[in-house]
Amino acid sequence: MKILICGKGGCGKSTITAMLGKYLANRGYRVLIVDADESNPGLYRMLGLSKTKTLAEYLGGKKQVKAILNNPELPKTFEEIPEEILSKRENLSVMSIGKIEEPGEGCACPYGALAKKFLKSLQPKKEEIVLVDTEAGIEHFGRGIDLEVDVIVNVAEPNLESIELSKKIEGLAEKADLKHVFVLNKALPEVLDKINVKPDVVIPFNQKFIYDSLDGKEVEVLPQIEELWEIIKYRNS
């Protein structure tokens, strides 16, 4: 199964991706987390893993990626993914598509195209799960990355802009005939009385995540992640 996590910047996409990845790995699944966000560097820290070379770097850099996209030889199985781009702990692995590293290097479009090609090529087996952590907003819909996954996890935090964007994400998912799960993250007490949407999963605000982040600690899995996984499985059945 391929699962894409998206939402407004700062809503907690990477945190939920990391928690879900750790939860599934602990359940015995073989998990690959694909960092498809060209800017946010925090996913490796959340997993307690070290950074590795990106897929784009492995392929020769951004200029070479543009050429490779015309005739890509990309992995079809987990086993075919180069070891040097994977950071691993037991049956959990994380890799990055590509990052913006230099001023004036150009837009991230080649990385988006590479992410789409990579996900289209990769075909996980029954007990293998691919989690895709996307950049903020909805550009991944425009790039067609979402068309290569099975389920969309749409994350919002309790502010008007984030919730309005989540509604747009839901509409785009429906137009693309994609299965969809809505998560309200960082929920304060009684916030559900003030919003006009009904989330599938509610994750309460937890100040510990802020302190752990400042201390460079990896994330701990919250109980609500089990509920999220059960809904994902149900929607994808």
Image: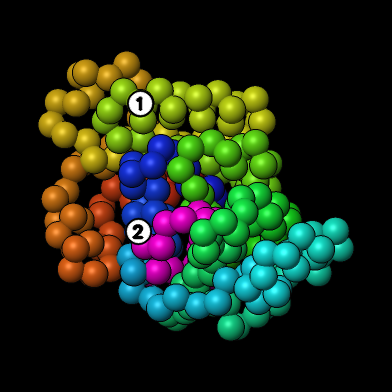
Which residue in the structure is indicated by mark 2?
19
The magenta segment: 25-44
Q: Position of residue 135 (x, y in %)?
A: 49, 48
Q: Is residue 32 visible?
A: no
Whether residue 231 is in magenta: the answer is no
89 over 126 or under it: above or below:
below
Residue at screen point 67% across, 42% down: 143
Amino acid of disc 2: Met
Relative placement, left or right, of 110 versus 232 is right
Is 181 on the left or on the right of 76, as rendered? left
Q: Which residue in the rendered view is the most extreme toward the front?
A: 104
Q: Nearer the viewer, residue 9 or 218?
A: 9
- The residue furthest bottom is 84
Who's the residue at 26% across and 52% down the image?
223
Badge 1 element: helix
Image position, residue 139 (x, y; %): 58, 39
Q: At which x and y percent is residue 199?
A: 35, 29
Q: Which mark is residue 200?
A: none
Amino acid at circle 1 = Glu
Q: Which residue is mark 1?
A: 161
Q: Is residue 97 visible?
A: yes
